[in-house]
């Protein structure tokens, strides 16, 4: 849709609209024109990009009485108090409370993975009950949209981005269905981790859990490097060749110990589907440091005792006899070693490990608040101090005492005062770790694709071509920094998938058709802004769009171009 004739016709409109919709409130906004290397580049990019932008603590801390209460209201009180105390200590006056429309949009994006419809927004605004924030949070947490959104997010956090074929395989082998079931049933997070690490499903409905290990195709180092950040919130790659040079508590023995726990696993195909078998023998080796000295890789990991296992002599040949195994609980599944290293890891290392709860809390906080209490969220080591150590400890202990209830944790953060602040930073606040204002961030690929479809078509498909295209362009979930490049910004201007959604508009529910059927340009502007931004248009925005739509005969092409501009704007593409 970004043709030369289109550029020449719309230049004035978009240039005048730039100050409001090319950036998002807050100090971390991005303007792609500033990334261009010279004035020629800025001149070319200005129009097309104007709408596109916008410590690791192991010692136990005592819990106050109110902090051991797993009631959500009590947890909210703890969050508010801990954050407020830090503001007072630092002399910070936090941002004002965000508007109701911003709050509703924020909740829908964070909990349901999409923007609200006009009807959903207006229904909530018209509600006069005092507990309507709590009711909306509960409604969204119990919705199928929440299930899909959290499955989207954790698919990426646990498995990483992939090609279209990777997503096809995850669906085919029920990984996606299993992940959805986890969040639909609100399964305890520690039980989820156990199922992923053991990869021994008890029923057909749980066989998708196998895919976490299986997709990594017997690459035991890759498995170890995935498990550490996913479940313990630490990165161990730097300890492969030597003790971690920055975080002294992470040893080379921890890296190779974690590898050893999974080194006996082998992918196998059974009549029940893909499985990860496990041998009862082997996996005894040494690792060398940079000086060349060798050390046996023992069954150990960070902050736990080494697990004893008889080690054969160097030249001794082990007998892989049936006596070393038990039958699997399901006919057709691989036999299970009586001494299973994976079982030992799940039972001895993972169970009640302090980092399990801390890492989950920090990650959910980052998902809802824009950054973790420890930042980055998956580097919870001695190099990265928590901004609010007492709060992190309180939330982690509360999460553990609530039987690792993910939904309760999300509800508590979403109802807290820091979550509901404006994204406009107060003048004296410069450190985002203070959480004195809401940290705006770009939508994930799935959030953006789902929201674009819903606003334009009135419905969405999770397997739409647009989802695949945006995943390729926006791979990150919870990036360490929010940086939008010119290449990123130009993506939606040239997206055939987006253009197809806009131009295939014969359906009566399509936004183009609905706009064309309205009586006046003023009505069209009202519907556009409520649909895309959840707010009324400012006077200058209203006049510019009315002028562009024209005083003469209205054309569907001009409506399409305005829709494209708003769908590609930063105000739409960011959660703020």
Image (cartoon, rainbow, N blue to C red):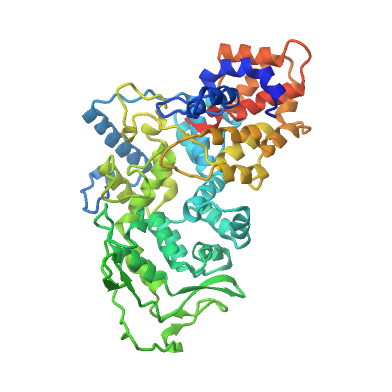
Q: Position of residue 411 (x, y in %)?
A: 43, 41
Of 134 and 487, nearer the camera is 487
* Left or right for 524, reference 146: right
Give the image quarter of residue 491: top right
495 shown above or below 341: above
Side of 97 where 380 appears, left or right: left
Q: Nearer the viewer, residue 236 or 106?
A: 236
Which quadrant would residue 526 be assigned to in this image?
top right
Which quadrant holds residue 400?
bottom left
Asked whether residue 226 appears in the rendered view, the answer is yes
Q: Observer-nearest residue: 390 or 123?
A: 390
Q: Nearer the viewer, residue 291 or 112?
A: 291
Decide: is 192 above or below 450. Answer: below
| Residue 397 image point, x, y percent | 30, 51
| Labels in figure, total | 0
Residue 537, visible in the rendered structure? no
Quadrant for the N terminus, please: top right
**x and y percentages locating residue 69 in the rendered image:** 30, 46
Q: Is residue 247 above or below residue 464?
A: below
């Amino acid at each position: 849709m970004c043709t030369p004739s289109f550029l020449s016709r719309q230049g004035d409109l978009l240039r005048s609209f730039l100050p409001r919709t090319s950036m998002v409130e807050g100090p971390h906004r991005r303007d792609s024109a500033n990334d261009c290397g010279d004035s020629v580049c800025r001149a070319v990019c200005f129009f097309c990009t104007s709408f596109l932008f916008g410590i690791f603590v192991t010692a136990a801390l005592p819990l106050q009485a109110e902090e051991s209460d797993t009631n959500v209201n009590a947890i909210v009180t703890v969050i508010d108090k801990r954050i407020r105390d830090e503001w007072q200590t630092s002399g910070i006056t936090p941002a004002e409370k965000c508007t109701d429309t911003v709050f509703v949009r924020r909740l829908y994006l964070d909990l349901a993975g999409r923007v609200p419809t006009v009807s959903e927004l207006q229904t909530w605004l018209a509600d006069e009950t005092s507990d309507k924030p709590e009711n909306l949070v509960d409604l969204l947490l119990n919705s199928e949209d929440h299930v899909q959104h959290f499955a989207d997010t954790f698919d990426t956090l646990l498995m990483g981005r992939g090609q279209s074929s990777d997503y096809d395989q995850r669906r085919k082998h029920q990984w996606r269905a299993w992940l959805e079931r986890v969040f639909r049933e609100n399964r305890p997070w520690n039980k989820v981790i156990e199922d992923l690490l053991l990869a021994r499903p008890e029923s057909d409905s749980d066989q998708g859990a196998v895919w976490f290990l299986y997709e990594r195709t017997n690459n035991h180092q890759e498995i170890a490097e995935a498990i550490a950040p996913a479940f313990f919130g630490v990165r161990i790659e730097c300890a492969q060749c030597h003790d971690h040079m920055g975080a002294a508590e992470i040893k080379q023995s921890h890296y190779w110990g974690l590898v050893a726990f999974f080194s006996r696993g082998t992918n196998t195909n059974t009549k029940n589907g893909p499985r990860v078998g496990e041998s009862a023998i082997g996996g005894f080796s040494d690792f060398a440091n940079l000086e060349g000295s060798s050390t046996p890789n023992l069954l150990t990991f960070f902050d736990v005792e080494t697990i004893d296992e008889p080690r054969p002599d160097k030249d001794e040949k082990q007998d892989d006899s049936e006596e070393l195994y038990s039958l699997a609980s399901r006919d057709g599944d691989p036999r299970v070693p009586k001494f299973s290293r994976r079982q030992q890891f799940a039972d001895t290392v993972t169970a009640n490990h302090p980092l399990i709860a801390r890492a989950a809390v920090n990650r959910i906080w980052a998902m809802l608040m824009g950054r973790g209490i420890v930042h980055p969220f998956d580097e919870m080591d001695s190099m990265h101090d928590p901004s609010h150590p007492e709060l992190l400890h309180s939330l982690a202990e509360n999460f553990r005492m609530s039987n690792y209830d993910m939904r309760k944790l999300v509800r508590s953060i979403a109802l807290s005062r820091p979550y509901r602040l404006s994204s406009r930073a107060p003048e004296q606040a410069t450190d985002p770790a203070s959480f004195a204002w809401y940290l705006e961030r770009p939508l994930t690929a799935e959030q953006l694709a789902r929201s674009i479809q819903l606003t334009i078509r009135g419905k969405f498909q999770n397997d739409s071509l647009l989802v695949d295209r945006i995943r390729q362009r926006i791979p990150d979930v919870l990036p360490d920094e929010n940086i939008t490049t010119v290449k990123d910004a130009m993506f939606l201007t040239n997206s055939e998938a987006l253009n197809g959604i806009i131009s295939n508009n014969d359906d009566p529910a399509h936004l183009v058709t609905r706009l064309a059927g309205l009586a006046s340009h003023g009505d069209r502007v009202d519907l556009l802004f409520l649909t895309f931004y959840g707010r009324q248009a400012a006077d200058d925005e209203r006049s510019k769009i009315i002028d562009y739509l024209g005083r003469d005969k209205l054309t569907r092409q001009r409506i399409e171009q305005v829709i494209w501009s708003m769908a590609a704007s930063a105000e739409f593409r960011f959660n703020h």
